[in-house]
Amino acid sequence: MNIIDLFNLSFIDRKDKIALEFGDTELTFNDLHVRSNQMACVLDSKGLEAGDRLALYLENSLEFVDIYLACLKLGIIIVPVNILYKEREITHIMNDATPKAIISFNEIEGIATWSAKELANQARNQSQKTVKCKATGDSPAAIIYTSGTTGTSKGAVLSHNNFIANAINLNTCWKITEADRLLIGLPLFHVHGLANGMHCAFIAGATMRLLTRFEHQKIKDECVDFKPTVFYGVPTIYVRLLEKTEREASQIGATVRLFVSGSAPLPPQVLDAFREKYGHVILERYGMTETLMNISNPYVGERRAGTVGFPLPGTSVKIITTDGKEAGVDEEGEIHIKGPNVFSQYWNRPDATSASFENGYFKTGDMAVVSDDGYYTLRGRKSELIISGGFNIYPREIEEFLMEQEEIKEAAVIGVPDRMRGELPVAFVVPNGKLDEKALEDKCKKSLASFKVPRKFISIDVLPRTALGKVQKHILAKQYSSHQ
C-alpha cells in the first residue's frame, strides 16, 4: 500500500466533500483527484519516471498541491526546497539530489527552471483518467533536506510507509476526523505542514484551509471566517498570538478544539500564558525531519508544560547516556528512536547514515530526561544545531560562508535566546583589518536564507579554543550574555 491508497479514502469515497480552500478557490476531494491526474499526465509527457527526483521551490499554493500529488501517483520522488533558500543553498540540493528539474513560479538564477504556472496551464487540457500509482509502501516518497551533524544539509529519504505511519498515528491520537477543519499557515516544504497537516487532512477527510503563509495581522479574520477546529503552529506563532487582545483571542479560539506546537521547544511560560488568555492548553509534541513525529503530549490527559509527552504508538524510545548506557529516571542522555516513522537513509550518504544509527535506533542528537511517570523533557541538543522560528540552522554552513570573505580571518556562529523565534544566530568574527558590518550583512543576505543571516556580528581578536584547536563556543555564549 502507498499513501495514495489512503488518500483515495477521501478522493473517491468523499469525492463531493470540500477538501481544500485556498484564497477564493474551493476544491472537493474529487477536484484534487482529477487535477493531480491531469498534472501527472503533464509530468509523464516530460519523460519523468518512477524513481526520478523533482524539486519543488514553491510557496504554499494550489500548484504545489497538484504537483505534489501527481508525483506521488507517478512514483516520482519529491524534493521540497525551502522557499527562503538562495542560489547557493539551492545549488547544493540540486547537485546532491540531481532532480530532473526544479519547479518554481520564477526563474532561479543559474538554474534551469520549469514554470509552475505553465505546468498548471498545460494540465487543464489533459486527460482526467486515474493514474495508477506505481509506488509501494517502501518506495521513497520525498527527500527532505535538513541540517544535521555536518555543515552541509543532508537529504532524508522518507518512504510512503513513513508518511503513512505518521498520519495514522496523529489522526488516531489527536482524533482528527472528517468533521475537522484544519487551518494551515505552515509551509508545505516542511514536514510539519506537509506530513502533519496536509497528509492527515486528506486521509481523514477533513477540510483544510491553506494559507500562503502565517500572517498574524490576518489570523483573527481567517479564524472567524473559516472556523477551524485544529490549528498547527510553531512557538513563534504562539508568541505572536499572545499579543492579541482578549476579544481577538476569544474569536480565534472560539471553534478550535486543538492547538498543536512543534518544530522547536515551546517555553513553558508561553503555554501557561496561552492557557490563561485563550482557555486552551497547547499540545506540544516532538519530531524531526528524519523521523516525523516521535513523542506527543496526550490529547486526553495532562499536557505537561515543558515536556513533549509520551512515545507515539509503534515508536520505541531510549535515552542513552554519554557512557553508552540506558538512562534511568531523570538521568540525561541522547534520545534514540526506532519505528515505522523513521527514515531509511540520507540520500547518497552511506557514511552519514551509518553514523546516525546504533543497534537499529536513530541517534537524534537531542538530549532529554524521562520522568518516573513517562513524560519526556528535552534538554537541548548534543550538536550545535540552532532552531530559529522552527527552521534548522547549522552554524558551520554560515561559518564557512563568512570565512570565504576576504575581510574575515575566522568565524564562529552561536545561537542566542530570543523571545520571538526561540534562538537567533550571532557571529563572532576575527576580521582582517577594520570590519564593515553592514557590507558583511549584505553579503549574507544575498547568499543565505533570511533566517540564517546573523543578527549581530561581533569582532573579536581571537577565538577561544581548546588545546586541540576546537572553538569553545560555550565561552562565546558567556561573553555574549555578559555584554547584554
Image (cartoon, helix red, strand yellow):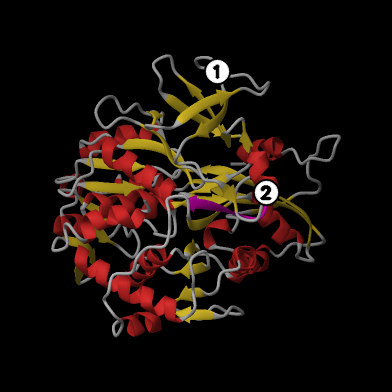
- Tell me where residue 356 appears, x and y as whole percent: 63, 40
Q: Is residue 396 left or right of residue 252?
A: right
- The magenta segment is 151-158
Q: Is residue 353 left or right of residue 213?
A: right
- Tell me where residue 296 appears, x and y as whole percent: 37, 33
As helix, strand or loop, the secondary structure at mark 2 comes to helix
Q: Is residue 395 left or right of residue 318?
A: right
Q: Is residue 363 above or below residue 159?
A: above
Q: Does residue 401 appear in the picture of this structure?
A: yes
Measured Cα–Cα span from mark 2 to mark 1:
32 Å
Q: Residues within 10 Å of mark 2 (few under 14, many from 20)?
A: few
Quarter of the image for residue 326 reads top right
- Tell me where residue 301 appears, x and y as whole percent: 26, 25
**Magenta span: chief secondary structure:** strand
Q: Does residue 266 appear in the picture of this structure?
A: no
Q: Is residue 92 above or below residue 235?
A: below
- Tell me where residue 355 appears, x and y as whole percent: 67, 40
Q: Is residue 95 magenta?
A: no
> Total of numbered circles in the picture?
2
Quarter of the image for residue 212 reads bottom left
Q: Is residue 154 magenta?
A: yes
Dot 2 corresponds to which residue? Answer: 350
The circle on residue 331 is: 1
In this view, the residue in front, 409 or 197, is 197
Residue drawn at point x = 41 percent, y = 67 percent:
74
Residue drawn at point x = 79 percent, y = 66 percent:
406
